[in-house]
Amino acid sequence: QVQLVESGGDLVQPGGSLRLSCAASGSIFSIYTMGWYRQAPGKQRELVATITSSGSRNYADSVKGRFTIARDNAKNTVSLQMNSLKPEDTAVYYCTSHVRVSIGDSPKDYWGQGTQVTVSV
């Protein structure tokens, strides 16, 4: 019913920048919180950043001051600008959205397929 498609993952050198994008499509009545999580090899998936429909942002301590999350409510998109990247930022990044598909349904979480970010010399 709802599809999330991420793009923008790549190989980048330490100190570099990347911008991830995610577009939600399908049967969407409203989208509440959108966000990004990441999962490094051998580790659990962790929160990176979230943004509510009104624009309130929340960041993991490890990315504060380096990453910026933004969304376009009209286009159902969310982005993650990542600056001053470090090797420890290497992970698969997943987009997520809390979506209500119709006025009578309860909202639930949807996930994208993930995009690889590798920070290395």
Image (cartoon, rainbow, N blue to C red):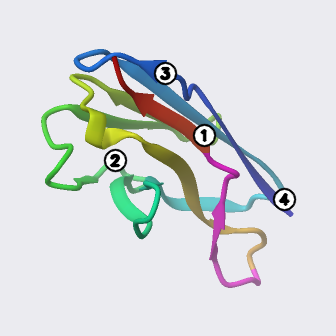
Q: Quadrant of the C terminus?
A: top left
How crowded pointer 4 is (Cα within 10 Å; few <14, some 14-19, many 20+) is rated as few
The residue drawn where x is 17% and y is 49% is 62
* SS label for mark 1: strand
Closer mark to the observer between disc 1 and disc 2: 1
- The one nearer the camera, 99 or 61, is 61
How crowded pointer 1 is (Cα within 10 Å; few <14, some 14-19, many 20+) is rated as many
How crowded pointer 2 is (Cα within 10 Å; few <14, some 14-19, many 20+) is rated as some
Q: Which residue is mark 2?
A: 55
Q: Which residue is mark 1?
A: 115
Amino acid residing under circle 2: Gly
- The one nearer the camera, 47 or 43, is 43
Pointers 1 and 2 in contact (C-beta within 8 Å): no
Amino acid residing under circle 3: Leu
Q: Position of residue 18 (x, y in %)?
A: 41, 21
Pointers 1 and 3 in contact (C-beta within 8 Å): no
Q: Which residue is mark 3?
A: 11
* SS label for mark 2: loop
Amino acid residing under circle 4: Ser
Amino acid residing under circle 1: Thr
Q: Is residue 114 above or below residue 2?
A: above
The residue drawn where x is 49% and y is 21% is 11
How crowded pointer 3 is (Cα within 10 Å; few <14, some 14-19, many 20+) is rated as some
Q: Position of residue 3 (x, y in %)?
A: 78, 53
* SS label for mark 4: loop
